[in-house]
Amino acid sequence: MFSKIVETNLKFNGPLSTRAETRFIVVHHLGPMPSSMKPEDIGAAWIHQVHIERHWCGIGYHYVIKRDGVIERGRPKDALGAQCESHNHESIGINVVGDFNIMSPTPGQRVSLINLLADLCHSYNLMPGEETIVGHLDKESPGYTECPGLNLYKIMPDIREEVGKLLV
């Protein structure tokens, strides 16, 4: 276990609040990616810049898993996220780079996601299950989002099971 996290030391436009509790982890996908970029070039710094250009204080996710499986820091681990509107005060967000309505996570992304989820479940004393490891769409109004994409969402039960095996 204990995933290697690449520290990005991103600079935010304003102070970040601390999250008071962590009840679950929200898994996201990037969604449609710009045709001008190779998917392997997209990481936390790029997402951070896009979010700043939208006049947000910076990246809303706590972690980004690149196509090669490298895990990068987004927001600090205990900071309030900006990734699941009504639940930021009680959740951590992980963005897995890809549009998983048309592609699947790479084997490296899958392994990194399982290991990171196990580390976070261990850190926050969460039992991996449908209430603690969720897709973004599980926490939004029906039809609001397809995130984390069909191809990632359909393997979430297997991912939760693998996380559970690492915690035994």
Image (tube, grey):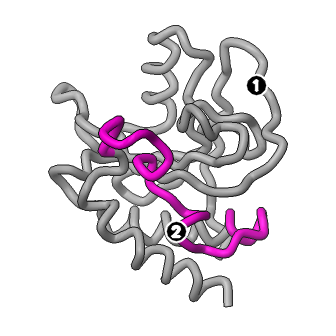
Residue 105 image point, x, y percent: 30, 61
- Residue at 50% over, 30% down: 45
Whether residue 4 is visible: yes
Name the spot of residue 39 as percent of width and height, x first.
27, 42
31 versus 1 height, above or below = above
Please indicate whether residue 2 sits to the left or right of residue 29 in the image: right
Whole-percent x, y for residue 91 in the image: 66, 47
If the image is split into quadrants, where does the N terminus sit? bottom right
Q: Mark 1 points at which residue?
A: 16
* Position of the C terminus by quadrant: bottom right
Closer to the eye: label 2 or 1: 2
- Asked if the residue under mark 1 is in contact with the one under mark 2, i.e. CB atoms within 8 Å, the reply is no
Magenta stretch: give its range.
120-146
Give whichever of 109, 92 is nearer the camera: 92
Q: Is mark 2 on a helix, strand or loop?
A: loop
Identified by mark 2, the residue type is Glu
SS label for mark 1: loop
Q: Give residue 137's position: percent from left, percent from top.
A: 40, 47
- Considering depth in this image, is 52 or 28 the residue closer to the camera? 28
Q: Residues within 10 Å of mark 2 (few under 14, many from 20)?
A: few
At 40% from the left and 68% from the top, the residue drawn is 156
- Is 122 covered by the magenta stretch? yes
Q: Does the magenta stretch include residue 90?
A: no
Q: In which quarter of the image is residue 85?
A: top right
Alpha carbon separation for disc pair 2 and 1? 28 Å
Residue depicted at 64% across the width and 48% down the height:
92
Taking the image as shown, residue 51 lies to the left or right of residue 121, namely left
Q: Which amino acid does label 1 sit on?
A: Leu
Q: Which residue lies under the disc numbered 2?
A: 130
Specify few, some or many for label 1: CA neighbours under 10 Å numbering under 14, 14-19, or 20 or more: some
